[in-house]
Image: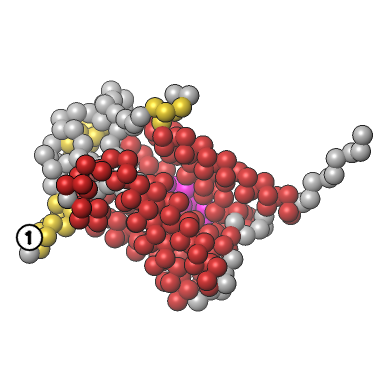
């Protein structure tokens, strides 16, 4: 077994008594990476940089708020009851992936309607950027021990030794954060390189492919995560992943049907 020891303090530095964590730094870096990729996509699509910056604000704020609120609803209500300001402490870890995704899509939809840019077109630009940003953000999860995997005897494991980590110490755990970072990075590359072909299907095809790929990654990785089983042996995130995949597949089917109308059923 190859062990990846992590003894790094989740707190990167302290300024005036305020702790700056690696998680927060990587979330910030993820936003920078996502915006840079979105700007490149917007230039290719002939959109002004100012539009992307405006959209990034809508999507970023929505995703962070949605991710934090859903995480707290699932895991941290007692903490919030005792310390209400903890709701805003995203730098300490604790963002729900699907909360951020759903809220981010809603924020993008509102922005697209306000700006006059079609939602499908905007979502296509955002898709590779989102995948790349999420890949970077998961490195912060790996350092801080957030979203850790189940104990494993497999060929690769991560072991935490810093008491500040969110993961159990001294236990060989499946490095699900690393797996997800790599998988999302590969998805971002695939979407970027394949966007030309996908665009032939119509606005929204790249975004639909992102939803399908993202759902497949999350569905598979949650077999290695400790979470509550809620339906047919599946965990909450896997059930949501199935719903996301169905939505992405339906979006692609609608685009294909609009591009190549299906023949009418023969009269009986």
What residue do we see at 46% from left, 27% from top?
Answer: 231
| Colour option used | secondary structure
Residue 268 in view of the camera: yes
Mark 1, other Cα within 10 Å: few <14 / some 14–19 / many ≥20? few
Magenta residues, start to end: 184-194
* Residue where numbered disc 1 is placed: 17
Residue 22 in view of the camera: no
Residue in the foreground of this view, choosing between 260 and 185: 260
Rendered location of residue 65, percent (x, y) = 34, 56
Rendered location of residue 78, percent (x, y) = 21, 42
16 lies above or below 46: above
Which image quadrant is residue 53 in? bottom left
What residue do we see at 32% from left, 44% from top?
Answer: 73
Secondary structure category for the residue under label 1: loop
Rendered location of residue 179, percent (x, y) = 36, 39
- Assess whether residue 22 is covered by the magenta stretch: no
The answer to whether 148 appears left or right of 47 in the picture is left
Q: Residue furthest left?
A: 16
Which image quadrant is residue 75 in? top left
What residue do we see at 39% from left, 27% from top?
Answer: 229
Residue in the foreground of this view, choosing between 161 and 121: 121
Q: Quadrant of the C terminus?
A: top right
Rendered location of residue 113, percent (x, y) = 55, 68
82 lies above or below 36: above
Q: Quadrant of the N terminus?
A: top left
- Assess whether residue 192 is covered by the magenta stretch: yes
Residue in the foreground of this view, choosing between 8 and 169: 169
The answer to whether 76 appears left or right of 219 in the picture is left
Which image quadrant is residue 161 in? top left
What residue do we see at 56% from left, 54% from top?
Answer: 206
The answer to whether 197 appears left or right of 139 in the picture is right
């Amino acid at each position: 077994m190859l062990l990846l020891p992590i003894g790094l303090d989740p707190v990167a530095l302290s300024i005036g008594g305020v702790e700056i964590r690696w998680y927060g730094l990587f979330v910030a870096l993820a936003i920078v990476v996502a915006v840079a990729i979105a700007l490149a996509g917007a230039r290719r699509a002939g959109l002004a940089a100012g539009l992307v910056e405006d959209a990034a604000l809508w999507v970023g704020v929505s995703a962070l708020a949605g991710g934090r609120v859903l995480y707290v609803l699932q895991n941290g209500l007692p903490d919030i009851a005792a310390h209400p300001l903890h709701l805003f402490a995203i730098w300490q870890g604790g963002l729900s992936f699907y909360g951020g995704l759903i809220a981010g899509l809603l924020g993008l939809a509102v922005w697209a309607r306000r700006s006059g840019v079609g939602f499908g077109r905007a979502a296509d630009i955002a898709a590779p950027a989102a995948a790349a940003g999420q890949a970077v953000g998961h490195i912060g999860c790996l350092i801080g021990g957030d979203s850790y995997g189940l104990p494993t005897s497999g060929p690769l494991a991560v072991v935490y030794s810093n008491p500040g980590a969110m993961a159990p110490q001294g236990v060989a755990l499946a490095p699900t954060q690393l797996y997800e970072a790599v998988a999302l990075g590969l998805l971002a590359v695939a979407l970027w390189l394949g966007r030309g072909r996908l665009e032939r299907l119509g606005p929204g095809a790249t975004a639909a492919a992102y939803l399908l790929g993202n759902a497949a990654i999350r569905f598979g990785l949650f077999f290695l995560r400790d979470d509550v089983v809620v339906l047919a042996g599946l965990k909450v995130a896997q059930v949501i992943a199935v719903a996301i995949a169905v939505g992405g597949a339906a979006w692609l089917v609608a685009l294909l049907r609009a591009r190549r109308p299906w023949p009418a059923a023969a009269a009986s």
